[in-house]
Image (cartoon, rainbow, N blue to C red):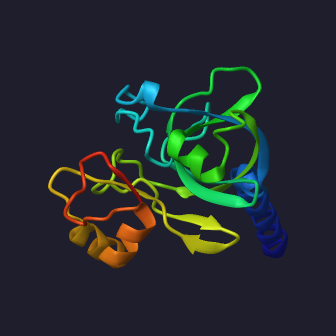
Amino acid sequence: MSRILGLLLLGFLACAASAVFADRAEAETGLASWYGPGFAGNPTASGEPYNPYAFTAAHKTLPLGTQLEVSYNGRSVLVTVNDRGPYVPGRELDLSQAAAEYLGLTQAGVDYVTYNYAGDGSYAGGGAGGYSAPQASYGGVQQGGVYVVQPGDTLYGIAQELGTTVETLAASNGISDPNLIMPGQELRY
């Protein structure tokens, strides 16, 4: 009798686990668009101001803070759901300008992307410093993202935080004088 009860309990747990994780098991393909600087500063559903240079996304139902790996044309980027939308029928994701630019989606404007559940971020909004892309990849190889220069930042300090050199940051961003960076300037790393 206890063996049958054990098997029933095991079966119940397996069914419950599959129901809980069913939406996270496979990649989904959906129509995505992007929104940009015209919305900068507007409050998102998470409460933080919209930052077009952050790697974020809007989704109608996923919990805020959910992390998604979004892929398009062989590129992938990790985004955090921080807003609701899109409000156009048939679309599943609204990507931030930075995420769309990184993926190469800005010219198309709207196209099909593949996205996977990548984790539950405990969403606190904002982010540390000017980081907008904690992780991005191209062909499975770790790449950088975008850092938005904050007041008081120096190229030397940013390079140290990112684990790179001033020379590398300057060369990859066309900076001739490392002492001349401006708050709001976008640095790719």
- The part of the image, by quadrant, that contains residue 175 is bottom left
8 up-or-down from 184: above or below: below
Question: Is residue 125 something that shows in the picture?
Answer: yes
Picture coordinates of residue 110, whole percent (x, y): 72, 33
Q: Residue furthest top?
A: 88
Picture coordinates of residue 131 (x, y %)?
Answer: 36, 57
Residue at (44%, 31%) from the top-left corner?
37
Residue 119 lies, with reference to residue 142, above or below; the image says: above
Q: Quadrant of the N terminus?
A: bottom right
Is 145 left, or right, of 169 in this rendering?
Answer: right
Image location of residue 133, percent across then percent down = 46, 57
Quarter where residue 100 is shown: top right
Vertical placement of residue 104 versus 163, above or below = above
Q: Position of residue 30 (x, y in %)?
A: 77, 40
Query: Can residue 189 be seen at all in this image of the molecule?
Result: no
| Residue drawn at (40%, 38%) of the image | 51
Residue 116 as seen in the image, left or right of residue 79: right
Q: Is residue 138 left or right of residue 82?
A: right
**Which quadrant of the view contains residue 95?**
top right
Residue drawn 49% across the image and 41% down it: 64
**In the image, farthest residue toward the front:** 176
